[in-house]
Image (spheres, rainbow, N blue to C red):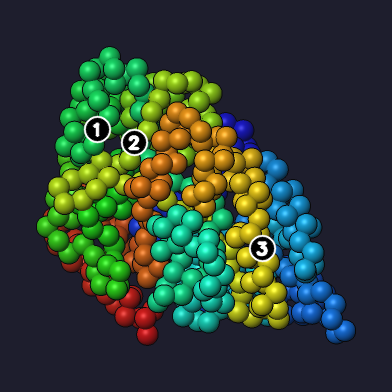
Amino acid sequence: MSPTTFSAHLDRRRLLALGGGVAAAGALAACGGNTGRATSSSASGGGGSASGGAKATLQQWYHQYGEEGTQQAVEGYAKAYTAADVKVTWKPGDYDQTTAASLLTGGGPDVFEYGNGPTIDMIKGNQVADLSGLLGDAESDFNPAILKRMTYEGKLWAVPQVIDMQLLVYRQSMLDSAGVTPPETIDDLIAAADKLTSGDVKGLFLGNDGGVSLMGAPMLFSVGLDYLTDDGAFGFDDQKAVDAFGKLRELFTSKSLLLGAPKDWYDASALTSGQCAMQFTGLWTFPDLIKSLKDDFGCIPWPSMPGGNRSVVVGAYGSCVSAKSQNVDAAKEFVKWLWVDQTDKQLDFATAYGFHIPARTSLVAQADTLKEGPAKDAAAFAQEFGHAQNNVLWTPKCATAFGDMMTKVVKDGADAKAEIAKVKTVAEAEVARVKG
């Protein structure tokens, strides 16, 4: 894999984060001071509108994408905007922590992207502007799962840019040889993984830790549960969750899981090299799968259990506006222009640099990369079975407790009900804290 491709995989893995599905935003209270952005302008990196009616200057931040050409593309979009002077800053390093810190100061961006929209601390701390109404008639055209994730208390806090997703992929020839059909239930998946395991080939790859850090959310979704309910109550103090995690433990202790692969779940090589017959991975691996396997692969949502449904985990960077901007209205207008009005640029950003799904349903049919085969199936799954990997109230502290629980239950065989109770204690305290 080239350094560029590897970087892209890490970028996308960060968005669809592990251990409870929270992007590593960093501790806001521990951050502050100079963000390292060289500027001679005033607060929010723009200096505001000059006197005499001059155009506003807006500072827009992006994390450092790994896909070649992305930086030049967004700089071109900014240059095409004539209502303000938009300056793009490409941020290497720990983008999440740097951005979170900058919002506490007067030296941050006017417009910035953030994984799945701003954190609850940003929202409750009045660090981001309310974008409600910005979508207008286009609101129903955006992926509903992503839009719900970027909404809190009825207000929209970010506009989705493009969608990334996780799903199950498989080698069609291996399934055909074993007489296995793509599984729709977890019990079918376990049986298929066992039947597909032969010699050095394992039936299923869920990451090198056996799905401990990756599969918690999909297993909850499979039984119709979530981390939290829509009103913020703890979401999985339920026997169905115990049963779901028990199934993952069953897989972990079976002989059908691939463990210790040279590259982890976010890379397609375990499937393309024949180490496994099925693998949970990301949409970004499709170019490698197509190149290596041609039409010898397919994809499906994560299977269901009684009471639940199949699912694909979706995530999206969202375009946000800093509440400290000297030009909040101008920043909102730019976000609307780029991510609502300019559908040609949205389609370009989604399909010309890497392998993504447009955030707008109407643009999916226009995407040449999504018109046939497994890619077309994946795009349809994102719309029908898409599930954001977490609730905005699910904080990093919640995610850490959830990750600890997964390790103990799946890897160590601890009592799931007792471990869920420990997570509930942490989560309820955290939700109470952030809701204030």
Is the C-beta separation of discs 2 and 1 under 8 Å? yes
Which of these two is toward me, 171 or 425?
A: 171
- Disc 1 secondary structure class: loop
Kindly identify the residue that appears in the image at 50 percent across and 81 percent down.
125
Q: Residues within 10 Å of mark 2 (few under 14, many from 20)?
A: many
**Which mark is first along the chain, 3 or 2?**
2
Q: Quadrant of the N terminus?
A: top right
In the image, is 33 to the left or to the right of 389?
right
Q: Residue at label 2?
A: 300
- Disc 2 secondary structure class: strand
Kindly identify the residue that appears in the image at 34 percent across and 17 percent down.
173
**Which mark is first along the chain, 1 or 2?**
1
Q: Residue at label 3?
A: 337
Residue 232 appears at what percent x and percent y? 30, 72
Total number of numbered labels?
Answer: 3
> Disc 2 and disc 1: Cα gap in Å?
8 Å
Q: Residues within 10 Å of mark 3 (few under 14, many from 20)?
A: some
